[in-house]
Image (cartoon, helix red, strand yellow):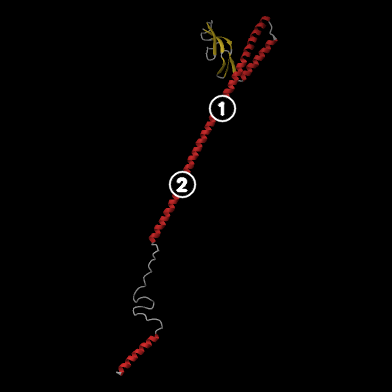
Amino acid sequence: MSETRQTVDRSDAARGEGDAVAEPGRSRPAPHERADGHQQGGSQAPEQAQSPGAHAPGDDGRARGDDEAGVRGADEDALRGDVDELVAAAAQRDEYLALAQRTQADFENYRKRVAKEAAAAQERGMVKLAAELLPALDNLDRALEEGAAAAERDGRDAPLLEGVRLVRSELHAALARMGIECFAPKGAQFDPAEHEAMAQQPVPGVQSGTVAEVFQPGYRLGNSIIRPARVLVAA
């Protein structure tokens, strides 16, 4: 009985010495664990699980694609807007160009019309002036005819007759400078547009329809007849 108790006391003392060798406050590791926190014979601990807010690589690619598509769409919209502005500007330019061309054409037509009207007014003025002077010229012609007849009867040329010839010559020269022409169509074919038939009768040696005699000369300005020539037409 005493031997058995001594054996138990020695066992307790041995356990007490083992506990005293261990560091205070630290428990012994389990037989299946190592001191570095890994299980014996096992691999390292699995990686930490992904957090709920993290994105997968596929999500990042789709996000970048959406961003690039949005940028391309914005660029296309901006380019389309620029093209629309250019088209509108070109249309407005064409409209202004057409308006300028119409204005220029209208101005050119107006200028031509004004020039034509001015020329016509000038022509009318000259025709009116010539018409006022023609009676005086007719009187000078009659005076010259009578003076020539009197000089032939008297056998001498009156000095006054020469002065009348000079006045008549100067008036005709002034009318010629204005483009007014005197015409006496004796021997020409009768033209009712330029001639006024005062009489018609047979004239020996003159073909029918021909001007046999000029009673009063005619005057014209270009193609405009100021006064037709008064003539005798051979029948």
Residue 102 visible in the snapshot? yes
The structure residue drawn at horizontal position 49% and vertical position 40%, both measured from the top left corner, is: 92
Please name the amino acid that badge 1 sits on. Val
x and y percentages locating residue 122 in the rendered image: 59, 23
For label 2, count other residues whose C-alpha is less than 10 Å away and answer few (under 14), some (14-19) or many (20+).
Answer: few
Instruction: Give coordinates of residue 144: x percent, y percent.
Output: 65, 10
Image coords of residue 173 (percent x, y): 63, 17
Give the labeled residue for mark 1.
Answer: 114
Q: In terms of image quadrants, where is residue 21?
A: bottom left
Residue labelled with disc 2: 81
Q: Residue at x 44, y 49 (%)?
A: 77
Asked if residue 115 lies left or right of residue 46, the reply is right
Say if 150 sits above or below 91 in the image. Answer: above
Distance, label 2 to label 1, CA atoms, is: 49 Å
Q: Residue furthest bottom?
A: 2
Q: Sequence order check: which comes first, mark 2 or mark 1?
A: 2
Quarter of the picture containing the N terminus is bottom left
